[in-house]
């Protein structure tokens, strides 16, 4: 579907001129998932990542101010969020620092900036901010965001020793009553911190503790992104599974049959009165 058609559809939704809100929301978002700016490769991952159900669970709506944390070089979720938020909303993408001494970070940010610049019709409502604590943590103007979202990043923050800083930055950016949405590879409940860092899987208990320490309240959880085929124990951690497939051809069909990782989906709220 062309982006212009998506924009017209959003206008009808916002004016209330077409259908009842729930039906329009579902239909509009489904059309965005099929929009022509998304590659076939990225669409193929929808069956594992359930973007429509996930963003609806987090309550993302047109005209929201949304912050996406560490979208990576490809901006997989950015492709979906940008047209949903629309011109009436605002999307901040909190990226790696341009002046980082980690080559992967600078390469990823450059790829992401090039992706956005190549398609201003889709990505013209995005502001790139920087998230690389402790030096950079202003991901959006304080108290302005309706939603802060992160997809499969908590293990990276634990490894870097900055997880507490990131959750504090999210709390600062959100309005009172705003939502923090977290999707993360799910470890066994009794996994140690060292195991989490090594494997890329994080326990729900660990994520909840980080959020609550920052001042958030756990509002809800969902099994939208659960995968019962994933036992959380693989030779190369979560990167054994697709899309990374770190073992190459070794047992490739086996890991493809498992699919992407088992994931928690948690919704936290910033209290209205602190």
Image (spheres, rainbow, N blue to C red):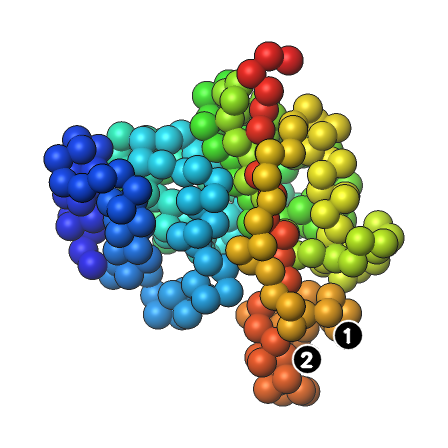
Q: Which residue is mark 2?
A: 247
* Mark 1 crowdedness (10 Å alpha carbons): few <14, some 14-19, many ≥20: few
Q: Which residue is mark 1?
A: 235
Q: Nearer the viewer, residue 117 or 216?
A: 216
Secondary element at tag 2: loop
Secondary element at tag 1: loop
At x 41%, y 48%, the residue is 78
Q: Nearer the viewer, residue 65 or 262?
A: 262
Q: Single out the mark in the foreground, 2 or 1.
A: 1
Q: Position of residue 249 (x, y in %)?
A: 63, 87
Screen quadrant of the N terminus? bottom left
At x 64%, y 84%, the residue is 254
At x 68%, y 24%, the residue is 215
Query: Which picture quadrant has residue 18?
Result: top left
Screen quadrant of the C terminus? top right
At x 46%, y 26%, the residue is 145
Seen in the image, is 247 located left or right of residue 181?
Answer: right
Q: Position of residue 214 (x, y in %)?
A: 70, 27
Badge number at residue 69? none
* Mark 2 crowdedness (10 Å alpha carbons): few <14, some 14-19, many ≥20: some
Q: Is residue 184 visible?
A: yes
Label 2, label 1: how many angstroms apart (C-alpha)?
Answer: 8 Å
User: Is label 2 in contact with label 1 (beta carbons under 8 Å)?
Assistant: yes
Q: Position of residue 90 (x, y in %)?
A: 36, 31
Query: Which picture quadrant has residue 241?
Result: bottom right
Q: Position of residue 118 (x, y in %)?
A: 29, 52
């Amino acid at each position: 579907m062309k982006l212009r058609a998506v924009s017209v559809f959003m206008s009808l939704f916002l004016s209330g001129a077409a259908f009842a809100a729930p039906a329009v929301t579902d239909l509009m978002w489904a059309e965005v998932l099929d929009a022509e700016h998304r590659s076939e490769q990225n669409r193929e991952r929808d069956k594992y990542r359930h973007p429509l159900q996930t963003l609806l669970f987090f309550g993302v709506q047109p005209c929201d101010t949304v912050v996406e944390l560490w979208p990576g070089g490809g901006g997989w979720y950015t492709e979906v969020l940008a047209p949903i938020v629309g011109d009436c909303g605002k999307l901040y993408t909190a990226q790696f620092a341009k002046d980082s001494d980690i080559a992967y970070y600078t390469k990823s940010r450059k790829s992401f900036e090039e992706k956005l610049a190549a398609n201003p019709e889709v990505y013209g409502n995005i502001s790139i901010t920087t998230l690389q604590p402790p030096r950079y943590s202003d991901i959006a103007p304080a108290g302005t965001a309706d939603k802060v979202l992160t997809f499969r990043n908590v293990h990276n923050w634990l490894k870097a020793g900055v997880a507490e800083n990131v959750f504090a930055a999210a709390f600062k950016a959100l309005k009172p009553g705003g939502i923090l949405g977290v999707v993360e590879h799910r470890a066994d409940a009794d996994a140690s911190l060292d195991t989490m860092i090594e494997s890329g899987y994080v326990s729900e208990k660990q994520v909840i503790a980080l959020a609550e320490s920052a001042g958030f309240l756990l509002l809800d959880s969902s099994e939208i992104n659960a995968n019962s085929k994933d036992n959380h124990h693989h030779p190369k951690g979560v990167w054994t599974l697709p899309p990374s497939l770190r073992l190459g051809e070794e047992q490739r069909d086996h890991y493809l049959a498992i699919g992407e990782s088992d994931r928690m989906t948690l919704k936290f709220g910033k209290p209205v009165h602190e």
